[in-house]
Image (tube, rainbow, N blue to C red):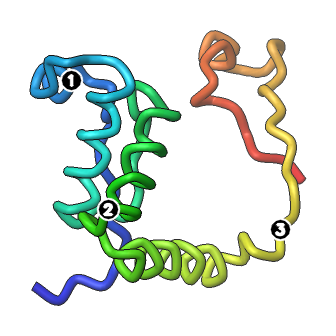
């Protein structure tokens, strides 16, 4: 298809996906991660078991099921996107919640309302 951007999964912890891997736990998370990478995803969001997903992909690379080149391509895409937006130079940021006295303070309770301040 020729798409050159980053492809990311939706939340991999969702029930619709986890039901496809009935063994559950780390093994299921690992298998789901491998399948997602093989399907073309560069980033895996919210695996149900992070360590299981990591180990599953690592094992798949070591066994040749996923090539190291394929992983390198994804990493390079992500690093290029960070460089294009200046994230490679930004350093660490501190997430600071909005003030409870600000208008719309009810929204301040939600992490999605937090701001990235430098």
| Location of residue 109 in the rendering, given as x and y in whole percent from the top left corner | 66, 13
| Location of residue 118 in the rendering, given as x and y in whole percent from the top left corner | 89, 53
Displayed quadrant of residue 58:
bottom left
Image height check: is 72 above or below 12?
Answer: below
Q: Which element carries disc 1, helix, strand or loop? A: helix
**Neighbourhood count class around disc 3 (C-alpha, 10 Å): few under 14, some 14–19, many 20 upward:** few
Q: Is residue 34 shown left or right of residue 46?
A: left
Q: Going from the N terminus, do you reach mark 3 or mark 2 first?
A: 2
The label nearer to you, 1 versus 2, is 2
The label nearer to you, 3 versus 2, is 2
| Location of residue 53 in the rendering, given as x and y in whole percent from the top left corner | 41, 40
Q: Which element carries disc 3, helix, strand or loop? A: loop
In the image, what residue occupies the spot 80% across and 13% down?
100
Q: Which residue is mark 1?
A: 18
Q: Which residue is mark 3?
A: 90
Q: Going from the N terminus, do you reach mark 1 or mark 2 first?
A: 1
Q: Going from the N terminus, do you reach mark 1 or mark 3 first?
A: 1
Q: Which element carries disc 2, helix, strand or loop? A: loop
**Neighbourhood count class around disc 1 (C-alpha, 10 Å): few under 14, some 14–19, many 20 upward:** some
Q: Is residue 40 shown left or right of residue 61?
A: left
| Location of residue 104 in the rendering, given as x and y in whole percent from the top left corner | 64, 18
Number of callouts: 3
Label 1 and label 2: CA atoms lie apart by: 24 Å
In the image, what residue occupies the spot 56% across and 83% down?
80
Question: Closest to the observer: 41 or 55?
Answer: 55
Q: Which residue is mark 2?
A: 63
Displayed quadrant of residue 27:
top left
Image height check: is 44 above or below 86?
Answer: above
Question: Closest to the observer: 6 or 50?
Answer: 50
Q: Is residue 3 shown left or right of residue 91?
A: left
């Amino acid at each position: 298809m020729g798409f050159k951007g980053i492809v990311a999964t939706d939340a991999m912890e969702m029930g619709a996906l986890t039901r496809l891997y009935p063994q559950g736990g780390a093994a299921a998370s690992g298998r789901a991660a491998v399948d997602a990478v093989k399907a073309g995803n560069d980033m895996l969001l919210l695996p149900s078991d992070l360590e299981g997903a990591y180990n599953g992909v690592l094992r798949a690379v070591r066994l040749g099921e996923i090539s190291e080149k394929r992983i390198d391509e994804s990493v390079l895409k992500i690093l290029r996107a960070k460089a294009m937006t200046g994230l490679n130079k930004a350093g660490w940021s501190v997430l600071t919640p909005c003030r409870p006295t600000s208008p719309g303070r009810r929204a301040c309770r939600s992490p999605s309302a937090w701001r990235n301040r430098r």
